[in-house]
Amino acid sequence: MSFRFEIDANDGKARAGRFFTPHGEVQTPVFMPVGTLGTVKGVPQDTLEELGVQILLNNTYHLYLRPGVEMVRQFGGVQKFMAWDHPILTDSGGFQVFSLSDLRKVTEEGVTFRSHLDGSSHMFTPESAVAAEIGLGADIIMAFDECTEHPADRERTRDSMERTLRWLQRSKDYFEAHKEEVPWFAERNRQTQALFGIVQGGMYPDLRRESAQRTVEIDLPGYAIGGLSVGEPRPQTLEMVDAAIPYLPADKPRYLMGVGTPEEIVHYVEQGVDMMDCVLPTRAARHGLLFTSEGKISIKTARYAKDQGPLDPKCGCKVCGRYSRAYLRHLYASNELLAQVLNTVHNLAYYLDTMRRVRQAIMFGELATFLSGVRPPHLSVP
């Protein structure tokens, strides 16, 4: 059995579907919480299961540095290492490597970089990055790409796009030659990992279109749109997604990397995106910023010190069902670890519930009605 994707319903450009992996089925559209180091910060795996998390994202760069790919391999893959018997996607580490800025050097062969942990020197090539992902053993793995900085002029952006395409072919060639090297998948009817390619092209719509067309020619089970949410205005993000989406196959999943707020992600679904991830719900939670049906709440402010009401009266998560705003504010003001845990649980619940409601709206052909209540004026879709 191999990775496969099915569409259950369409509503305009939006789709409700499902894909099948060695560790289970995932219903789309789906939001993937980020578990960079093999953990969603502050939230144990049983709580993630209670929240209905279908798939997690792990980071190859960080796991490569610590605890190391070989350690994870000895455990039988990242799922067994972190006690999570559900699908996982690993990024290639490309974004993290390129964000190191002064600590890395890019050549045609790959990227030489220094560890942010101890300054030791390392090199990622398309082949070695895919080898690391094979060793980690996630269900979906990403090809090694060059994430173009923003702003970047047209010549620089095209050069970067061309390199990403060359690296994609090298990533695929290595994967095809070594994809059977995940022995624990033998327990799951000899399924293999699925390699996704990444569309680049910076902030130039024609380059986004060209990148999408040429990426699809390499023929993979799924495609991602990368290099966004790197400082550009949100309308430009939507424009770049809109430029690429029509050229990605309708019968394969589309993954928009590293986005966004609850209000934004529903509009990416409207454009035809199936998969998203973002650190925002967990990172914001650690800083006391919470997402609710009444808008964003900064729980650290004094106005909540005596508020006996729930964080969000319309939310069914266990945080809103048990704790008052005053207590959550007290925990945060007291610098209690429990504040970060409860805030993170609520924000994840809010994102996941948003995706469930969007999927339901698509299934019933009611997405336009759903979106009419959440569309901010600056997020008009091209």
Image (spheres, rainbow, N blue to C red):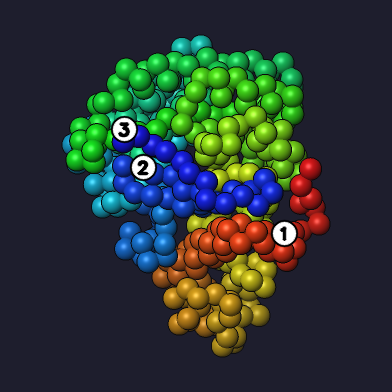
* Spatial CA span between label 1 and label 3: 38 Å
Q: Mark 2 = which residue? A: 21
Tell me the element at label 3.
loop
Instruction: Work out whether mark 1 precedes mark 3 in sequence or the reverse, and give the earlier one.
Output: 3
Residue in the picture at 33% in, 59% down:
45
* Spatial CA span between label 2 and label 3: 8 Å
Q: Mark 3 = which residue? A: 192
Q: Position of residue 148 (x, y in %)?
A: 62, 27
Q: Quadrant of the C terminus?
A: top right
Instruction: Work out whether mark 1 precedes mark 2 in sequence or the reverse, and give the earlier one.
Output: 2
Instruction: Work out whether mark 2 precedes mark 3 in sequence or the reverse, and give the earlier one.
Output: 2
Q: Position of residue 48 (x, y in %)?
A: 38, 61
Using the rendered image of the protein, determine whether residue 90 is visible from the camera's viewpoint.
Answer: no
Q: Position of residue 37 (x, y in %)?
A: 37, 45
* Label disc, if present, on residue 368 of the rendered structure: 1
- Tell me if 47 is positioned left or right of 181 in this view: right
